[in-house]
Amino acid sequence: MQISHDFYPFLEELAKASSAAILPHFRTSHGVENKLSGGFDPVTVADRGGEEAMRALINARHPEHGILGEEFGSERTDAEHVWVLDPIDGTRSFITGLPTWGTLIGLTTHGRPSLGMMVQPYVNEIYAGDTKSAWYRGPLGTRQLKSRACGSLADAVLFTTSPRIFKPVEKQAYDHIEKQVRLARYGTDCYAYCMVAAGMADVVIEAGLQAYDIVALAPIIEGAGGVVTTWTGGSPSSGGRIVASGDPRLHEIVLKQLADVPQN
């Protein structure tokens, strides 16, 4: 084990609790609700059960900590330590039986992402990081995560969950970058970021993210040697328009190409 963060053992406990609540509902006839009156934003009993399990543990063991979760909102977010929870990142994959979803468990310390994990209990994989180191545990054993060198878009593999997440002006900027890369792939949700940390891909470009979509993933990519910022180079802690790159050189190239996108 390479992560020495004080709260890492508790992070493992949260992962086990959420997995126990979520996994029995995967590839079953669970009910799906839509959170939007216009559009489609699915939620299931598994989403709610996973977050409830994690919140119960946090409130029992660390009642002084804050919580920000996708399904049940926020409490004590002015605390020094705030847990940021997305019980199922990739609910669309979950409800269609695809294993490209994961539980995201992040921790901010003084407002900055400091510890994070993506756990996928169906394939039994964990990706974790503390900004200084990152590791993987799964069917292929345990190993340190290291992003790969990639200094040009022409050599890069690019991920985004879907081109439909972008507003028209964002889509134009994204398309310009996609045309320059070696390979682009869609539909990967949180797995895209983990593959950048694992050295299997090079950059993720997304927009419209919430804090719970990215806080857990930033310490993993940074711990593997990569960079995660907003399109303007700011902190990813509040979500928004996000770029995650395995190579800092590539990150600067991408940011320069996104620099002129209007903020609104």
Image (tube, helix red, strand yellow):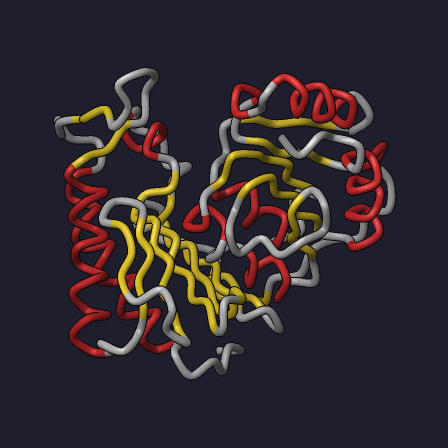
Residue beneath the point at 31% across and 73% down: 65
Please determine whether, in this image, residue 90 is positioned above or below residue 237: above
The percent position of residue 21, horizontal first and vertical second, equals 16, 51
Please determine whether, in this image, residue 238 is positioned above or below residue 164: below
The percent position of residue 202, horizontal first and vertical second, equals 71, 43
Q: Which of the two residues, 229 or 6, is positioned nearer the viewer here? A: 229
Residue beneath the point at 42% across and 66% down: 107
Residue beneath the point at 48% across and 63% down: 128
Q: Which of the two residues, 260 or 224, is positioned nearer the viewer here? A: 260
In this image, 83 relative to 128: left or right? left
Using the rendered view, name the quadrant where residue 32 is placed.
top left
Using the rendered view, name the quadrant where residue 241 is placed.
top right
Residue beneath the point at 48% across and 78% down: 1
In this image, 49 relative to 264: left or right? left
Using the rendered view, name the quadrant where residue 26 is placed.
top left
Quadrant of the image containing the C terminus: top right
Please tell me how many numbered marks the rendered image carries.
0
In this image, 234 relative to 186: left or right? right
Q: Residue furthest front?
A: 264
Please determine whether, in this image, residue 72 is positioned above or below residue 170: below
The percent position of residue 133, horizontal first and vertical second, equals 60, 71
Please determine whether, in this image, residue 108 is positioned above or below residue 6: above
The percent position of residue 53, horizontal first and vertical second, equals 17, 59
Q: Which of the two residues, 65 or 125, is positioned nearer the viewer here? A: 65
